Amino acid sequence: MCICLTSANLHAQQFEDFVRKYTDANGKSYMQPLADAFGANLNSGWYHSAYIAKPGFQIYLGVSAMAAPIPAKNKTFTATTQGFFTPQQTADAPTIFGKTDPVEVKGDGGTAYVFPGGLDLKNLPMAVPNLSIGSLFGTSASFRWAAYDIGEDVGKVKLLGWGLTHSLDQYLPVEPFHVAFGFYMQQFAVGDIVDANGWLANVHTSYQLSFVTLYGGLGYENSNLDISYTYEEDNSEVSFNLKGNNNIRATVGFTLNLGPVKLNTDYSLASQSILTVGFGLGLNEVEKIRGME
Amino acid sequence: MMKTFIIGLLIGMTLLWGCEPSTYTFVNTVTKDLEYTVDETGAFSETYTLFADDFNKDLDLPEDAIIRGVNIESFAIKSNPQTENEASAVKMNVYAGTEPDPFAKDVTLPVNLYLNYRAMPNLVTAAVNKLRDQLYGFVVDNDPLSIVFRIEGDSDPVPGERIYLIIKIRVTITVYYDVESDIGF
């Protein structure tokens, strides 16, 4: 991670050049897929079972890695030439996840307008630590936190998330299934430049087999990505306020319970789908009457 | 000079897998304002010299950049009439470097209609392409060291009037270049 962070710093100038042309009306469309994928990633990896010990001590500490596969529709957008270029034209230009090659359109008298290329990414991955602890009245609390000081003129990168999961099967005759409702929210910030946040309200259910817990959920989510930056050369301001397009997500997955070791994977189907893989250690995460732990 | 942008950070923070070197194409745009003070009665000729060093300083490319292309995105023009100006318009040609042909021909500039920048009409494709080639030389190896932009004209529709204008021509130039980087995935 440190290597990549260093790399990102070294090449920040080039990224600045990537989007420098997009301080205008095209910028939002160019960046929107980043907001979609990043927001969907933020809202993922919160659960790997619907079972909550009632009453009893329950804890899970692990890491979730998510990848947002970038759909083809999010790799191009209809861009419009800006400024004094004539005549005004539109073109299918790459988004930030699109092909690296710029798109050029010809104008009057030998002029040409260039729409920048993208990063040519197939996926946007992310990894976060998770801690869940419970339960009190069939409720467990979840947290995710990370901080890293980039230094220079950037500042700290901070991730903070929390959530509550409440067992519904204690009220409902749904045995052998477990059902829970969860609400999770998180914030991600990079100095004064980035402020991202998201929340997920979710109902999920799980069914326990011998070493495997099958789970699924249906959720409603929201995310925002605000970017504010001042170019050093000319003090021009760049400001994007982007709202993730994801709303409804349906999730299916399974957890391998190898004693205290938990391995899980799930896929969330949504406007921006997400594949999640989790690894962690958990205690009392499987219903004891089944004798699995 | 360490400059940062959020995309780099987001990618650094979130795309933690597979930092394999890849070649990326970046785009940088430079805008230069060429300023002329025309204080003549009748025909005028004024010059503005653009130096390669200044241009490249504004461009600020990384050392390992491989230039893929230079384009002229647009020309825009505006006038700022001074109190002693009597001409309602000027008609002029705009030249670059030693090229005998103007890259903008018979450009009519109604002084009160062009108080703000407007797209410059009457561009000549062949001459604009030659200017583009000179700018490419600027970027690739500082050759030529400078380009002299010259405007020549007279008042219009009545030649010989008192002209006292500050004329600005805004040239927007796009340079795109490749850099191998390990920010990929």
Image (cartoon, coloured by chain):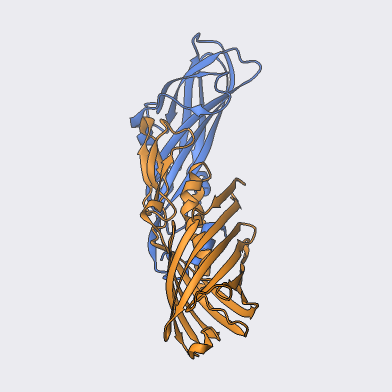
Q: x and y percent of residue B157 in the render?
A: 49, 10
Which residue does the image show at 42% across and 69% down from the upper left?
Answer: A252
Which residue does the image show at 42% across and 86% down from the upper left?
Answer: A210
Q: x and y percent of residue B5 in the render?
A: 55, 56
Q: Nearer the viewer, residue A205 or B13?
A: A205
**How many discs mark residues in the rendered view?**
0
Hey, which quadrant is residue A223 in on the image? bottom right
Taking A128 as reference, is A190 above or below it?
A: above
Which residue does the image show at 50% across and 46% down from the upper left?
Answer: A27
Query: Which chain did the image draw in blue?
Result: B
Taking A131 as reference, is B138 above or below it?
A: above
Q: Nearer the viewer, residue A195 or A237?
A: A195
Q: Which of A48 and A160 is in front in this view?
A: A48
Q: x and y percent of residue A173 in the render?
A: 52, 74
Q: x and y percent of residue A286 in the render?
A: 51, 84
Query: Which chain did the image draw in orange?
Result: A
